[in-house]
Amino acid sequence: MFSRRHLALGLVALAAPLVSAGPCDIYAAGDTPCVAAHSTTRALYSAYSGSLYQVERGSDSTTIEIVPLSAGGVADAAAQDTFCANTTCLITIIYDQSGNGNHLTQAPPGGWDGPDVDGYDNLASAIGAPVTLGGQKAYGVFISPGTGYRIDDTTGVATGNEPEGLYAVVDGTHYNDACCYDYGNAETSNTDTGAGHMEAIYYGNCTDWGSGAGSGPWIMADLEDGLFSGLSAGVNTGDPSLSYRFVTAVVKGEADEWSIRGGNAASGTLSTFYSGPRPSGYTTMYKEGSIILGIGGDNSNSAQGTFYEGVLTSGYPSNATEDSVQANIVAAGYETASLVSGPALTVDSSISMRATTAGYTTRYIAHTGATVNTQVVDSSSSTALKEEASWTVRTGLGNSDCFSFESVDTPGSYIRHYDFVLQLDANDGTKQFFEDATFCPQAGLTTGTSLRSWSYPTRYFRHYDDILYAASNGGVQTFDATASFNADVSWAISSGFA
């Protein structure tokens, strides 16, 4: 005997191919409608043509709404590229497509005091996560530590023990072991109010509470005061480490039952990693109905990850409904896109990088010991100085689409950022070092080439008082000053002095 939910879903399938319906159309047909729907890459309803997200540019603080190319379609990335040409841009709002007004904006400070929490969390770069969907360019939301989005006063989101479903499409290769890269239901107070006050998707390899099999990353659930992969805070060997570039992550819960499901967002079907009773102490839930992205319920914001799309539903979706949503996601055709633009760099070549700011055009990026700085260098300079101002281009240690810069005179040592100061350090082989030492070239904001950090794409190589920083346009540090920013982050790259 078919339930009304399965019959409704079947009628949608008979009326039109599921690929023409959006994920939220599919959930609605399954009697578990979306109460919040967020995506910077595409519309999640077949008829949706409203704003997907807003970006603000650094040159004049004006904003633009990015909409789909057509109803139900992919975001108009070209409009963003035109608007943001020769300046920096941040994602300021991620709009709720459900009609409930559950828009995600810059997260306020909360009960946890972590990196960059002197006030509101940071906003994401608008260009940090380029992808294509069906061959059309779009941008995801690249969450660096200290970055987060939130809405506390929501409409329609599950509270208490009410059932709900969640899914998110994330970058399966962008994660860390810190707390907490979440998307989902959290506290309205921005503080930890106790076990069961959250129900959010977590993605990463944090082992402070529980874990899955292997070394991660895993899909888990943040239920507050614990990340859970199954019945307890221990190891669920049925929750596998994932290595897909694009991951579909699913968490859903109802009275004394919850599930984790997941799969490759670019192909195949979903698998169930856990389905059963809630952990001890979580039988009755106390969900509060806030929505978070990239942070924990108390604003714990040391984690990193990339978000492309996701929803919260009313009611506990069936596996069949979620399987149809997964088919829709696969049909959307997520693929990688280049992180690099502008003049090309050649791996294993030697380069020198000259400042283009007026009055500083004789200065090149060099180093004095571990300090990365600018120095005046020319053909008559000493051999030692020429070597200090020369860098070997290497394939990016943290992302092979970008580059790392090895010192010519100190082989095995690379430029990396540490507390947003650039320094020369020996490669210690850690994931953190690889990420800190990876930079992505783009067309210079004024001329030549600008070099942005892969792990903090709002931050660029900048000279300030002759020292090199990973600086943002208008951040809280002195070296983030907006005056002369575009010129200070634009470099003329030539063959190396040595």
Image (tube, rainbow, N blue to C red):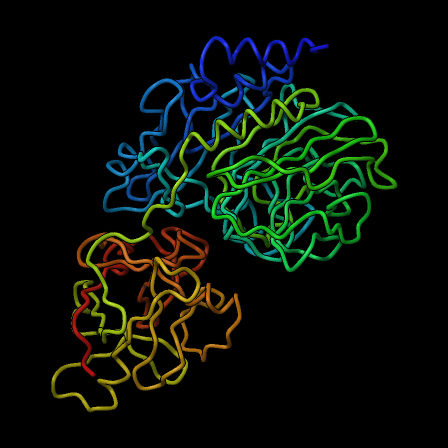
Residue farthest left in this picture:
379
Residue 446 in the image: above or below residue 250:
below
In the picture provided, is 230 more to the left or to the right than 457? Answer: right
Percent coordinates x, y for residue 235 in the rendering: 76, 53
Question: What residue is rendered at 21% in x and 74% in y?
Answer: 363
Question: What residue is rendered at 44% in x and 22% in y?
Answer: 19
Percent coordinates x, y for residue 252 in the rendering: 69, 31
Residue 21 in the image: above or below residue 344:
above
Quadrant position of residue 495: bottom left
The N terminus sits in image quarter: top right
Quadrant position of residue 66: top left
Percent coordinates x, y for residue 297 in the rendering: 68, 41
The C terminus sits in image quarter: bottom left
Q: Nearer the viewer, residue 274 or 151?
A: 274
Question: What residue is rendered at 57% in x and 44% in y?
Answer: 294
Q: Nearer the viewer, residue 124 or 325?
A: 325
In the picture provided, is 22 more to the left or to the right than 4? Answer: left
Residue 356 in the image: above or below residue 113:
below
Quadrant position of residue 5: top right
Q: How many marks?
A: 0
Question: What residue is rendered at 51% in x and 14% in y?
Answer: 13
Percent coordinates x, y for residue 17 in the rendering: 45, 17
Residue farthest front in this picture:
1
Q: Nearer the viewer, residue 64 or 40?
A: 40
Q: Nearer the viewer, residue 169 or 353?
A: 169
